[in-house]
Image (spheres, rainbow, N blue to C red):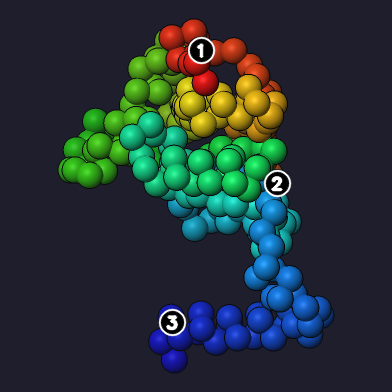
Amino acid sequence: MQSYQKLLKDNKDWAAEKLSVDPDYFDRLAHLQTPEFLWIGCSDSRVPANEITGTQPGEIFVHRNVANLVINTDVNVLSVLDYAVNHLKVKHIIVCGHYGCGGIKAANTNNDFKPVLNMWLRNIKDVYRIHREELDAIKNEDKQNDRLTELNVQEQVFNLAKTSIIQRAWKNEQRPDLHGWVYGLNDGLIKPVFEMKAGTHIDTIYEYNNL
Ligand SMILES: [Zn+2]
């Protein structure tokens, strides 16, 4: 059996298992999606949102990309954000990075990864520049990357707050709260590193006054 055929076989087993426990399982899920959370995580195969948070299908709306970035020209992440905030009415948005992230490590070198990876990783280099003083002082390479991972999550939370999508929801509905977390591949534990409650003021240059 080819490796991908095993995925299809395991899917059949999984669906049968779900039905054996709850015959209405798929009927119910097919008709309703009311997740309370939007998860913006890394594409890394070792950080599956549902599994590490013990949540089931229907509970978390998920977007993943390399190094969990929120970029203001990325139609993909902004579409997910728009839908999650304005239609699903999520109460919390979680940006979850992870220690040992390949995207963070790659950005923290001077290696040319060629377009398009250079374009993507540039956003992480910008995070380094903003926090250069703190990061330059950390001489251990792994520890420096760990801290860059945390600061990257923090900057992505700021990037969410800079959007009119978030600012409008904060003004009209006092939600969602924004959370920056980092997952540890070594111990399986999530560390909250940054939080921004709905309505928090950010640098005024980013704040819209005619929402
Ligand atoms: Zn990663």
Q: Which residue is found at the position 69% from the left and 29% from the top?
A: 173
Q: CA distance from mark 3 to mark 1?
A: 54 Å
Q: Is mark 3 within 8 Å of ligand 1?
A: no
Q: Which residue is found at the position 49% from the left and 46% from the top?
A: 80
Q: Quadrant of residue 191?
A: top right
- State the residue position of label 3: 3
Q: CA distance from mark 2 to mark 1?
A: 28 Å
Of residues 51 and 15, the one drawn nearer to the viewer in this rendering: 15
Q: Is disc 2 in contact with disc 1, using a CB cutoff of under 8 Å?
A: no
Neighbour class for label 1 at 10 Å: few (<14), some, many (≥20)? few
On residue 64, the disc is: none
Neighbour class for label 2 at 10 Å: few (<14), some, many (≥20)? some
- State the residue position of label 1: 209
Q: Is mark 2 within 8 Å of ligand 1?
A: no
The answer to whether residue 92 is left or right of residue 11 is right
Residue type, label 3:
Ser
Q: Which residue is found at the position 49% from the left and 58% from the top?
A: 45
The answer to whether residue 133 is left or right of residue 99 is left
Q: Mark 2 or mark 1: which comes first in sequence?
A: 2
Of residues 58 and 149, the one drawn nearer to the viewer in this rendering: 58
Neighbour class for label 3 at 10 Å: few (<14), some, many (≥20)? few
Residue type, label 1:
Asn
Q: Mark 3 or mark 1: which comes first in sequence?
A: 3
SS assignment at label 2: loop
SS assignment at label 1: loop
Q: Is disc 2 in contact with disc 3, using a CB cutoff of under 8 Å?
A: no
